[in-house]
Every structure is written in structure tokens, then in C-alpha cells.
Image: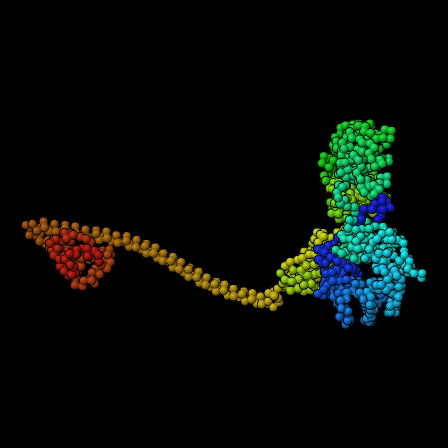
Amino acid sequence: MYRFLFIFFFINVVGFAQELPPIKIFTAEDYKGQNQNWGIAQSEDNLIYVANNGGLLEYNGEQWQLYTHISNPILRSVKVKDKIIYSGSFMDFGFWEKNEKGQLEYSSLVEKLSIKLKEGEEFWDVKFYQNWILFKSNTRIYFLNTVSKEVKIIESKEIISGLFVSNNTIFFQKKNVGLFSVQNGEEKVFSNDAFFKDNKIINCFYHNKELLFLSKEKGFVTVKETGVTQVKTDLNKHSFLIFSAIQLEDKSFLLGTISNGIIFLSENGEITSTINRKKGLSNNTALSLFQDNSHNIWVGLDNGINYLNVSSAFKIFEDEDGALGTIYTSLFFDNQLYLGTNQGLFFKDKNLKFKLIENTEGQVWFLKEIEGNLFCGHDKGTFVIKNKKIISAITKELGTWNIKEVPNNKDILIQGGYDGLSILEKDNESWQFKNKIDGFDISSRFYEFYNDKLYVNHELKGFYELEIDESYTKVLKKKKINIPQIGYGSNVFSFGNDLFYSSSVGIYKKQTDGSFKVDSLFSKKINDLENITTIRKLAEQKNTLYSFSNNNILLITSNSISLSPQVKAIPIAGSIRNNVLGFENLTQISADNYLIGTSHGYLLLNDALVKKEKNVTISLQHVLVNKIDGVKTALSLTEAPVLENKHNNIEFSYSISKYDKMIKNEYQYRLEGLSNNWSDWTENSSQLYENLPYGDYVFQVRGKYGNQIADIKSFNFSIKRPFYLSNLYIVFYVIAVLFIIVLINIYYRRRYKLKSKSLLEKAQKELKLKELESAQIIMKLNNDKLRVDIESKSRELASSTMNIIKKNDFLNTIKTELANSENKDISKVVKIIDKNLNNTDDWKMFQEAFNNADKNFLKKVKDKHTSLTPNDLRLCAYLRLNLSSKEIAPLLNISPRSVEVKRYRLRKKMGLPHDENLTNYILEI
């Protein structure tokens, strides 16, 4: 059982009063409704429902959704029983149930049961009593039996100002009349005392075995046989106007006022706290109150909704006016809380306000108690504080990072500063500056004694091992230690019996040979944590370290037997922690209580209240689907839908119904069928997939609340193939493809044939061309041969002709010579010569040679001129050879004159004009 006093767990420790539980504020813009919120309830699956002026609000831990049911959607009341949400509104009351799509649907009981209402009725309250549901308007109470469906009505002429169910009894108040109860379905006067006539009753509680009635202005009263008795509480000391009230799980009370916010009242009637607008509430008028299943508080305000995370292990102090600045260190010392900031050293005075200690203005780096003295490391040096003031200022060395005790010597302290190391010495119970240690002037923020040596780490300049002389005046030996991998946020510390060096890349342990190697025990513990900050020792704790990761505070302690590290991760959102990088700080101010400094105040952590969440569950809220630019429609959450191909834009909404302000819900998702890889962790509680291809899918989502991972939630769905990929179309495609293949085959066969024919024709043409070329070559060769033959024949003809001419000339010469001779016997010789001159054999030989040289000439001439005689043809042949008359004469054995005559006659036979040359004519034939 959570005790309400946990809200103020620091009051008994340090007297704090300004630290508040985390408050989450929801405005009308956040939940998309109206300002006023009249009732709050929670369902079995931890969803929150609010009766709002705009309708019914549903909150799943991530998103708000507004439901409306009538034209006038103002809801005045809401209650949840089992899985049904009952609500009352203007001229109607009914219930809401979730359909298979995860959406609420409204049913009017007035319509279902044919109930006739009075004009203008509004239903301001819903109560449950056994099998009955009670709805109250200003003048009626309607009783509905959930089993028999029976309806009963109690009607009043006076205004019914309140309806209560307590100690198995129904009470209601009639204005100016008194307090009534319902027995056996009938109203009976419970008390007509003047108190109940004059004071409005806000609520009724059964407390400490008696009925307590809370009035609007006069606090609590109880009814006894002697009459109405006032119950003494702190309310009697104030003039609050109470509008709403509930009793919490721990039997304490929470009251909502009209103008003073909310009041926490212990079960003994003591006001433990008031939270109003000045202290973080967004409005001072609390219209409705509700404590949820996690024992946290919801407040329905006149303007907005607030959530108070009262069960959280954290409380928050906000430095709203910035008077403190960024907090770098803190300490609970001498029953006072001290804060070291960038603006100085502050403490809380008796008025519970922080006050600056005089002359400490500037940067404070650390606070530490040593032998009953409060040491303050400051930008100006070292201050010793007592009774809230500086009693000693050691400023010879400016800028003090830290101070530590020297082993085996309680009279000196070693301090690390901007320029190295120095020694403080106790003198008559007072600490004074003794000397600076020579030989080392590197800024020394982190240092640690181990085996008589001092180890100093500087994040940028390196990690050093120093051997110092016995008087602590100078460094005898300085050695720079090589670390396998350098990271940021480095530090050196001892844990158990070992020395460690840590950074963002890992934790290294000093080995016996002096080297540093990765420590497997530490690494295993922090391996899954991201962005671990500088690991530091918790003040006054030997084997306790602290650090921060992305969304956790880490407390590292040792196992009592093996001294192995044990890491406790306390979840908190990094944005709320908001530390200065590299100067994260955590201080233990009591056994279980810690203070974490931030840039705008601080957080208080009660480690005893850190609880491990069990049964963290994730719920799929909605699955919406639509076509491109189409209207979104919800899908059933209980079925595996088969979607049309164009409805391939699908959005999933999911949530973990945890409302802790300090912890952010995170989610991972994947869509099997598209990818088997999980997404990165994200705070987004919805995922949209657009233009999904057809196929079968499984959407999976899992959530993380703090360090607890919820089970996987799955949703199966399929997207149909497009119509052009349906079975019928596939058959058509197969037939079409086969048909196309056949056509292509036919086409290619025809093309092959045509191509073959074309190639054949081309080959034939090429063959013919080659044959023609060959024929031409042969012809040319033949022509060349013929030309040679003709030339040869022509030479033979010319030779023959010349021989005949020469022979005839010779014979004629001889004949002439013989004719001149007086010898009578010569006549026989002359006859022989004449016989040789007229010998036809010469002509035949000439004719054969001529025909060989010029085929068909004589035939052509004969065909053209049929009247020509053989002698004429003989003349034509001689003229064809372009012989002159003088050369022709011996061939014909006539005189040149006779040749001319023959030429003349031949012209006439051929019918040549006078001006045409006979020889040219014959040559052209």
C-alpha cells in the first residue's frame, strides 16, 4: 500500500516544503476539447476518461481522443464499471462501449428504456450501488437495475444538491430541506439538522467507523444521536470553498477548491500540502478529482487537466525566477541543505527560502564535510563554512576542484585546483594553506590515492601516475599512463580493492604490471546502457558510485561478498534531468534520499520508493487504413483483415497506459513481410506505412516503460493483389503470353524464311554478279585475246597486203623491164607474170586475212549494197584498210587512174552524195 505521506517524504528529513510531485499539464489544445472537466474515471485497461464540455475524452498514455454523441455534447459526469463507461449529459444519460475497432460507441439508456425526462435536465452525477446505476439531475434520481432493467425514479421539488454512496448506503441532499437516505427503494430523512439545510455537502466518507460529511465551507461533520457534530481539522482554520473531494487509498483526503487549488489532508485532518497555480497547478479551480490504479492524482480543472505523479520516487524543485542558477553540487550539513551553483553557495533559511551566503558569489564546484567542517571548492579558492557563513577563506590557489584526505595523515588535506595540487594543513583546529606540490601544474579535477601513489586524470591532457615525497612538497616521479582507447567523461576512482579508469568507451582496471585493461565485470553491467556520463564516487560512501545514462540514474554498489559491481538503474527522462554535460551531480542527503542538481533547480529521489514495474503491457489502440488522399477508416482489432489493393496506407496507434512524467514510454516496431528488423526505440506512439505492396504482413510492436519491456503485440493483415494480378488475369496473361510466343515464333519463322530467301537471293545475286564479273573478266580476256588476235591478223593482213603489193610492184617492174626488151622469148615470162598478177590465190589469202581482222565487214557491205560485185567488194576491202589509189592499183593490177574510176563507180553504186568521202563511209561501216 502506498502511503500518501510519500509525497512529502523529505519534510521529516530536511524540512523541505517547495518540492512538489511531478505534474503533467494538459491544456484544451492538447486534448482538443473544451476547458472545463467535470468528472474523471479509469477503465480496467487503465485508460483515463474525462467528462468534458466538448464530450468524452479518452487518454491512453500517449494520445487524447474526443468522442461526441449528440448535438449538445457537454458531459457532466462519468463513471466506469467493468468495461462500460457511463456518462450523464444534457437531457440524456447512457453508456459507452468499445467496438471491435477499438472505438467507443454510445448507447442512450433514455432511448433504450423509453424514459421520459423533464425538460432541461442535466445529469451531474453517476453512482453504482449493488446492481443499480444511479443518475442524478437537479430534481431527480434515476435508478436503473442492470439485471432486471427496472427503472425507479425519486423526484424532488427542491434541488438535489448531492448524491453519495457510502457504507453500503445511498445518501442525497435536498437544498434547504436536509439529508436523506434511500432504504428499500424509498427516500427517508437521515437528518434535517439546520447544518444540512444551510450547507452544501460535497461528499460523504466512511472513516474510522463513522460517516463523515464534507461541506462546501464548514469542513467535516458527523451525525450522532445527539445531532450534527463538527470534526476538528485544519480546514476549520481556513476559509476554503470546497467544490470536489475524494478519499485516497491511504485513507487521507484530497480536496478540490474553487480558488485555492487542491488540498491534501491527512487522515487525522492535518493539511499536509496545498498545491495551487503558484506551485505548479495550471488552474486554481478543481472541478473533479480522481486517484488512478497507480495511486496518482488526476485533477479536472476549470481550464485543463493536471496529472500529479504522487507515487513517483522523484520530487521537483523549480527555480522559476533563476535566483539559484545551475546547481553543480549539494550537501545536507548541520540540518541545512546547501546548494553550490554557478552563482554562489546557498542554504535554506527558516522561511524555507534559499539564501546566498555572503561573499560566496561565483562558481561553486564542490561541497564536502571533513571532520565536522564544510569545505566549499570555489572559483576563488577554498572556503570553510560554519553557521551559514565563511569562517576561513583559503585563496592562495584560485579554483579548487576537490579536496581529499591524505592516507595515514589526518592533519593534512590535498586539494586539486586549476594549476595542479596543493596541501592544506590543520593548525589549532583551523585549516590553512601549506604549500603547492611542485612538479605538476595540470588542472587536477579527478585524482585518487592508490598504493602510496597519486593518480590524476585530465580529460584532455591525459592520465598520470605521481610519486610524491613524504612531505608532500614535490613530485618525485611523473609517469603518463597509456589507455588503450581514450574517450570523453574520463575519471579515476577506487572500487573495492582496485583502481579503475573510466570513460565513455569503457572501464579499465589497473593490473599487477601497472597497465590498465578492460574490466569484464564492470563492462558486462553497463554494456546495454547508452551515453554513460562520468562515473564518480558518492560522497561518504566507500564502495558506491553514481553516473547517468540516456534515461537512467545509475547507482553502482559492490556485492557484499565478492565486491563485484551491482548496477541499479533508476529510470528518468534525460530531458527532465537536464544536467550540465560533464558536471552531472548527485548527493546523498539521507539513507534513501538523494538530490540531483539541474540547470533550473533540483530533483529529490527517494530510492526506497523506486519500484520495479511488473506486467507492463502495450495495447494496440487503432488501426486506420485509407487510399491515397482517401478517408481513413478503422479496422477490427480482433480479426486479420484482407485489404483491397488500393487501401494500402495503414497507420497503427499503440500505447502503454503509464502516465509517469519522469519516464517516457518508448516503442519499437517492425512489419514482417516488409522488414524483419526492429526499429530504433522512439517515443512516437504511431507508425504509418504508405503504399504497401500486396502480400501478407504481421505488424509487431513492443514497448518500454523505464527499464521494463512489454510483451510484443501483433496484428496480421493482408493486402490483395491488384485486379490485373488476379487468378483470372494471370490465366489470361499465361494464354496471352503463349499466344504471343506462338505469334513471335510464327513471325520469326517467317522472318527466318524471308531472311533465308533474301540471303539466298542475295547470294544468288552475288553469285550472278560474281559470274557476271567472271564473264566480264573472261570477256575482257577474250576481248583482249581477240584484240591481240585482231592486231595479229591486222599485222598479218598488213603484211600480206604489203607483200602482195610488193610482189605485184616487183612483177610489174619486171614486166615493164621485159616489155622494153627486144627479146621475143620474154613474152612467155610476161604471160607468167600476168598470170601471177591476176592470181586469185592472193585475193583468197587476203580475203581470209581480212575477214579474220574485220569479221563480217564484207557481208555487211554486201547486205547494205546488194549490187556490188566481187571486184567492188575487193576495192571496199582495200579502202577499209585505208589504202591509197596508188597502193590499191598493184593489188588490182590496174593503173591508179583505173582505181579512181573504180572508186567513182563504187560511189555511184553505193549512192553516196558528192560531198561524202568514200573512204570515211567504208570505215564507218
Q: Nearer the viewer, residue 770 or 728?
A: 728
What percent of the width, then of the height, locates residue 733? 58, 66
Quadrant of the image occupied by residue 726: bottom right
Q: Which residue does the image show at 85% across and 44% down from the upper left?
A: 14
Number of numbered discs on residues: 0
The residue depicted at 69 percent of the width and 63 percent of the height is: 634
Residue placed most toward the observer, 783 or 474: 474
Residue 623, quarter of the rendered image: bottom right
Q: Position of residue 404 (x, y in %)?
A: 82, 34
Q: Quadrant of the N terminus?
A: bottom right
Residue at (85, 30) in percent of width and height: 430
Task: Point out residue 160 in the picture as x, y percentages from the top left corner.
Answer: 82, 64
Task: Work out whether residue 496 can be spotted.
Answer: no
Question: Could you tell whether 16 is left or right of 718 in the image?
Answer: right
Image vertical order of residue 251 relative to residue 455, above or below: below
Q: Position of residue 561 (x, y in %)?
A: 86, 43
Rendered-image quadrant of the C terminus: bottom left
Which residue reaches farthest left?
822
- Residue closest to the eye, 617 or 493: 617
Placement of 152 over or under 7, stated as above or below: below
Q: Decide which of 495, 26 is in the foreground and name it.
A: 26
Would you say 922 lies left or right of 3 here? Answer: left
